[in-house]
Amino acid sequence: MSAVEIIARAASYDQLCEILIARRKQLGLSQMAVDHIAGLQDGYTAKIEVFHKKMGRLSLTLLLGALGVDLALVPSAVPHRKTDVNSTDYGSIDKDHHAKIGRKGGRIAMSRKTPKQRREFARQGAKVRWRKWREAKAFQDEKDRRKLKRLAGLKPSEGGA
């Protein structure tokens, strides 16, 4: 095995993203340029860099290639605490992390509500969605009526419907 030059170390996904951002800037590439070189859709790198999107297997490979780096595993310098990925104990995660991930931080607020409060919150959301759907449906029905009248040669104010 040949010696590997370690450019940077990351112990978390956030650190990996920060390293990739620094590498992009070191190369003097814009986010759009990285998207173009990697063959990703426009704006993909920007979404990853602001933590709106997570890298998948394919996008990680393409991004690493565009930045001219490989991913290597090295023994950890410090022991990491064990975390359960499926845990709902959000109290142990620092608040800065939730500020970065945006709307997913709402899970914490929801976990603090009682089951009755969660049901009421869901009920209110459903009411709003149904109201918006009914308004959109009525608007579309009116547009369809006008289109049919126009196709029939009538003005929208003429004829009954």
Image (cartoon, rainbow, N blue to C red):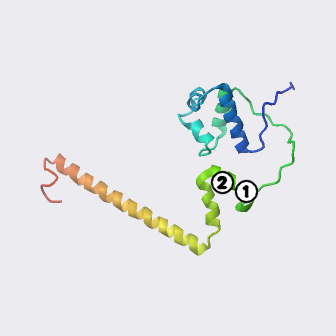
Residue drawn at point x = 47 percent, y = 65 percent: 126
Q: Are marks 1 and 2 in contact (CB under 8 Å)?
A: yes
Which disc, if any, is residue 98?
2
Q: x, y percentage for residue 44?
A: 57, 37
SS class, disc 1: loop
Left or right, 66 with respect to 148, comes to right
Q: Please, what is the three-letter code of the amino acid marked with disc 1?
A: Ile
Q: Which residue is located at x 62 percent, y 40 percent?
A: 49
Separation (CA) of disc 1 from disc 2: 8 Å
- x, y percent for residue 157: 14, 55
Camera-side residue of 87 and 93: 93
* Quadrant of the image containing the N terminus: top right
Which quadrant of the figure has residue 86? bottom right
Give the amino acid at mark 2. Answer: His
Q: Position of residue 66 (x, y in %)?
A: 65, 27
Left or right placement of residue 17 versus residue 73 in this view: left
Which label number is shown at residue 93? 1
How many numbered tags mark residues here? Answer: 2
